[in-house]
Amino acid sequence: MPRETLNRDQIVQAAIDLLDAEGIEGLSMRKLGRQLGSAPTAMYWHVGNKENLVVLAADRVWGEIERPDPAEVGWRAAARALVHDAHAMTLRHPWLITAVSTHFVYGHGLAGLQDHSYAVYEAAGFTGPDLDWAVNTAFTFLAGAAIDDAVKAAMVRARIRPGRGEEGSAEEDVVTWATGIASRYPRLRARLEAQAGEDPARAARRKFEFGVEAILDGLEARLAATGTAAATAPSATTAPGPDGGDPRPRH
């Protein structure tokens, strides 16, 4: 595809597809050029370099998150949906957690999401620094969950772990190896035994839901204690979305 027929949007979307499939380490201008049927020089012409392309791709995926209107569904339902949808986005694009830890990712996608997050918690009754901290609390929980997901994905990719250099030791499945270590600690062993046989996907979903509801319960209690809670809004018990943080604004 000649340079003149390409545009930045096409390149960024193709980069997202490649990042989803191979991660940041698998992204290169040469691969992207082959995927688009164009010379690598055309990629540089439109997006500068790989680092800039990762930033563009990361900001694009932040824009995928739905932005429910707190005036229509209530602040708590809107906040819940926002965190759940953001989490689903990080699962679709697992490379994002690496991108935000190694690149300065900021653009209209993240800024728009932040602005909407402020609107949600403002509708709840938060103001001033408490508003900043409410937004940041939800984002921090999301970031932690995304890191946890990334660790689990790394375990799956690792598959085999050497026997720690012990003479004559065999290679082990990484989960077996990690479980063996955890089992040496009584509380970890008790939880492993209690969770044996539970569906991992269901367990992960319930864990995330528990965390979201605990945060929202705490924020609601704080509003009630300060007498700043918004009027009761339509309730919602299910949701399948955060905001961001950096200078952007600082929390």
Image (cartoon, grey):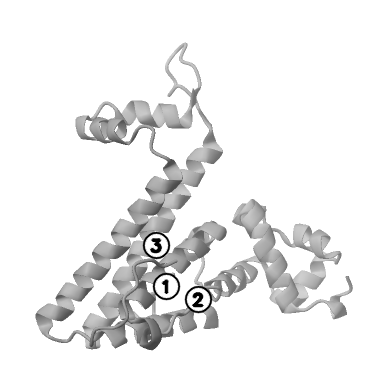
SS assignment at label 2 = loop
> Compared with residue 251, is residue 92 higher up or lower down, i.e. above or below?
above
Looking at the image, do the residues carrying marks 2 and 3 touch, with CB atoms under 8 Å apart? Answer: no
- In the picture of the structure, the residue carrying the numbered disc 2 is 66
Q: CA distance from mark 1 to mark 3?
A: 13 Å
Mark 2 or 3 closer to N-term? 2
Residue at x 64%, y 70% (from the top left corner):
53
Callout 1 amino acid: Leu
- In the picture of the structure, the residue carrying the numbered disc 3 is 143
Is residue 201 toward the left or the right of residue 129 in the image? Answer: right
- If the image is split into quadrants, where does the C terminus sit? bottom left
**Percent position of residue 192, x then y:** 31, 33
Viewer-nearest residue: 186 or 215: 215
Looking at the image, do the residues carrying marks 2 and 1 touch, with CB atoms under 8 Å apart? Answer: yes
**Percent position of residue 226, x then y:** 11, 83
Q: Residues within 10 Å of mark 2 (few under 14, many from 20)?
A: some
Mark 2 or 1 closer to N-term? 2
Q: Residue furthest right?
A: 2
Q: Residues within 10 Å of mark 3 (few under 14, many from 20)?
A: some
Callout 3 amino acid: Ala
Mark 1 or 3 closer to N-term? 1
SS assignment at label 3 = helix
Looking at the image, do the residues carrying marks 1 and 3 touch, with CB atoms under 8 Å apart? Answer: no
Q: Is residue 177 visible?
A: yes
**Percent position of residue 72, x then y:** 39, 86
- In the picture of the structure, the residue carrying the numbered disc 1 is 82
Callout 2 amino acid: Glu
**Percent position of residue 178, x then y:** 39, 31
Q: Residues within 10 Å of mark 1 (few under 14, many from 20)?
A: many
Nearer mark to the viewer, of 1 and 3: 1
- If the image is split into quadrants, where does the N terminus sit? bottom right
